[in-house]
Amino acid sequence: MTGARIVMALWAMSVTLLGIAGLGAWRSVHAGGDGAPAAAPDTPRTARRPAFDAEDPKYVTDHDPFRLARHPASVPYRPELEGVSPPPPAPKPPHPTLALGGILGGPPWEALLDGVPGHDGSMVVKQGQVIGELRIRAVTHDSVIVQGADTTWRLGIRRSWQ
């Protein structure tokens, strides 16, 4: 097929589709005007759809014109709460203040950890140990990694020059 024949075929299809669309529009206008199927000949058109009366408050409230679902909201409106902000969320408990007191031994390393909740003074900990909500992830020759519920601490040994 050549380019000219393709163009002619596309034009013919376009004209045919426009003709079908025009025929459908003409039938809908003459059948009912709004594209809906025509009512039975013995039924007047006003019986199919009641007229909208903007002056009738009962009609407006019954049909909820501003809601897509056409039914009242599930939460009642309370004007006395208008402009009142919700209460602030409860504060989170403070994170423990952990400090590394020192590193003990050689591989496997152990650490002296200060400020562990529920323990007074220093506590000797090693890798993999769980203390309440704290987990000791790693102990190296100069640092400890402690993981809490939402925080991870990397504690290093304080040197005189730091």
Image (spheres, rainbow, N blue to C red):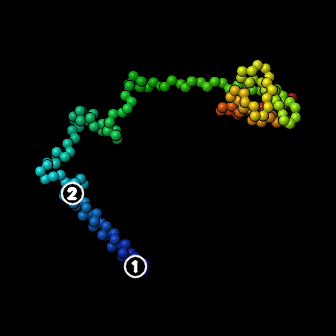
- Disc 2 is placed on an element classified as helix
In contact (CB < 8 Å): disc 2 and disc 1: no
Mark 2 crowd level (few <14, some 14–19, many ≥20, 10 Å Cα): few
Whether residue 154 can be seen here: no
Q: Position of residue 34 (x, y in %)?
A: 23, 52
Residue at 72% x, 30% y: name it: 130
Q: Please, what is the three-letter code of the amino acid marked with disc 1?
A: Ala
- Residue 154 relative to residue 15: left or right: right
Q: Which residue is mark 2?
A: 29
Q: Looking at the rendering, which quadrant does residue 95 occupy? A: top right
Compared to residue 44, the image places residue 6 above or below, namely below
Q: Tell me the mark number nearer the camera, choosing from 2 and 1.
A: 2
Q: Position of residue 133 (x, y in %)?
A: 68, 28
Mark 1 crowd level (few <14, some 14–19, many ≥20, 10 Å Cα): few
Residue at 48% x, 25% y: name it: 85
**Alpha-carbon distance for marks 2 and 1?**
38 Å
Lower position in the chain sequence, tag 2 or tag 1: 1
Q: Residue furthest top?
A: 120
Question: Number of callouts in the render?
Answer: 2
Residue at 18% x, 52% y: name it: 39
Q: Which residue is mark 1?
A: 4
Task: Name the image quarter holding the C terminus.
Answer: top right
Q: Residue furthest bottom?
A: 2
- Residue 93 relative to residue 88: left or right: right
Task: Name the image quarter holding the N terminus.
Answer: bottom left
Q: Looking at the rendering, which quadrant does residue 123 occupy? A: top right
Q: Position of residue 148 (x, y in %)?
A: 69, 31
